Image (cartoon, rainbow, N blue to C red):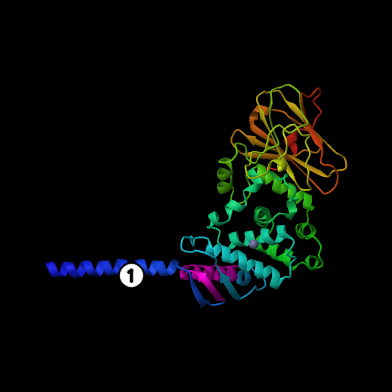
Amino acid sequence: MEGKTWVVLLLVVLLLIVSVDTNRRLQTQGSSGVFRSKNFTITYENIPALTVRRLAEGMESAYQKLVVQHGFREGSRSWSWKWEGDVTAKSPYCDRSIAAHEYFHSIQLLGYSLKLADRFLIEGTAMWAMREVFPRDVECYIHLLGDWLVGGTDVGSLKLLYRGHQAGLFWNFISDRYGGAQLIRQVFEHPDIRLGIDWPKVLSQLTGKAFLDLWAEFAVALAARQVPDAKWLYPRAEQKTPYVPVPVFVGEWTGQSLTIEQSNWENPYPKLPRTNKWEVGAPLTVLHPYGIHFLRIVPSSESPFILRFQGDPDTDFRVHIVAQKLSGAYEISPLIRECVIARPLDYILFQIVVTRGENGSGRYQLSLQKPQTTDFLLCHAVTAQQ
Ligand SMILES: [Zn+2]
């Protein structure tokens, strides 16, 4: 090639680089205007063009999936978005998930007039919607769900059913197990919801199960790593705390009688203020309705043991044994009052999962003892393999 051709080629390449770079900067710099997609009009201020397109894409996808496919009522088609400050450094990766979340809020309010104050339902199902529309954008919502595993579920002054985004994991679980998107839609459409009747009662009617039993299923799934997105959630949590989900008690079956009356494991989650932690040495008490306690017992003796639960008679407890076999598989059985683990060394770990209803003090204790007779019920005779 001649020298002149080289110069021309070089100039063309340089021009291309400059124009791509200029284009990229224009895409990521704040701008203002009106953007129209098929179903939405977005009035925007100080938002990069690329982001506006991602927001529109998120709402169009949410509209398609939730309204057209699943039959939810419509939300708002007209949006005003305004961003503050320097927006050039923001990653646009989660913008479409965020838009799907916000669009679902407009469905809740315009389509169904749901009570805004009920954050567990409002924020929890908006988190569910994000995952439903963009299931692969795990990084956009997973960090808001991990409190179940590392934060403890019975701490803080805020009752569990008043909490917000973290509730997404419960709704993901319940929709996976009981009818998918249609269950969520049926909750919204239920006439009792508009009468102000609590969603737990509605959920109970729709599934045919007592709410406390549904709740216990969720608690057990947390212990058995059977909640949605477990393969992302648990490794993240294990970077923060050694035992996941975080227990109130850690102990061992050595063949000697063991009575467990106090917490011996402090919640290490650094974000929780001191006053909100449960104290080591405090009597075992599930403080709040629907709080969940996990107790861990590792077997080191082959002696059988009776596992006995004694709780405040005024408290409606649900107690389950989640036993992990050497293969890693889980065996799950209810613990009504007492039962026998006949071959402890068939298991790596026992987790006792305790939750409760609205009334009573939540006080309880557990004991492990050698059986004196053989006429006890085996714990896993009534196992529901999951
Ligand atoms: Zn929200």
- Residue 261 in which image quadrant: top right
Q: Is residue 179 above or below residue 8?
A: above
Q: Which residues are magenta?
A: 40-65
Which quadrant would the C terminus be assigned to in this image? top right
Is 63 one of the magenta-colored residues?
Answer: yes
Q: Is mark 1 within 8 Å of ligand 1?
A: no
Is 64 one of the magenta-colored residues?
Answer: yes
Q: Residue at x 75, y 34 (%)?
A: 379
> Looking at the image, which residue sits at the far right?
314
Residue 386 visible to the viewer: no
Instruction: From the viewer's side, name the closer residue of 383 and 213.
Output: 213
Ligand 1 quadrant assignment: bottom right
Which amino acid, by three-letter code, is at mark 1? Ser
Q: Residue at x 78, y 53 (%)?
A: 211
Q: Residue at x 78, y 50 (%)?
A: 212
Q: Is residue 84 above or below residue 149?
A: below
201 left or right, relative to 119: right
Which quadrant would the N terminus be assigned to in this image? bottom left
Q: Picture coordinates of residue 77 (x, y %)?
A: 61, 76
Residue 22 visible to the viewer: yes
Secondary structure predominantly adopted by residues drawn in magenta: helix
Q: Picture coordinates of residue 50 (x, y %)?
A: 46, 68
> Looking at the image, which residue sits at the far left?
2
Instruction: From the viewer's side, name the closer residue of 193 and 4.
Output: 4
Q: Is residue 46 above or below residue 329?
A: below
**Which residue position holds label 1?**
19
Q: Picture coordinates of residue 247 (x, y %)?
A: 68, 37
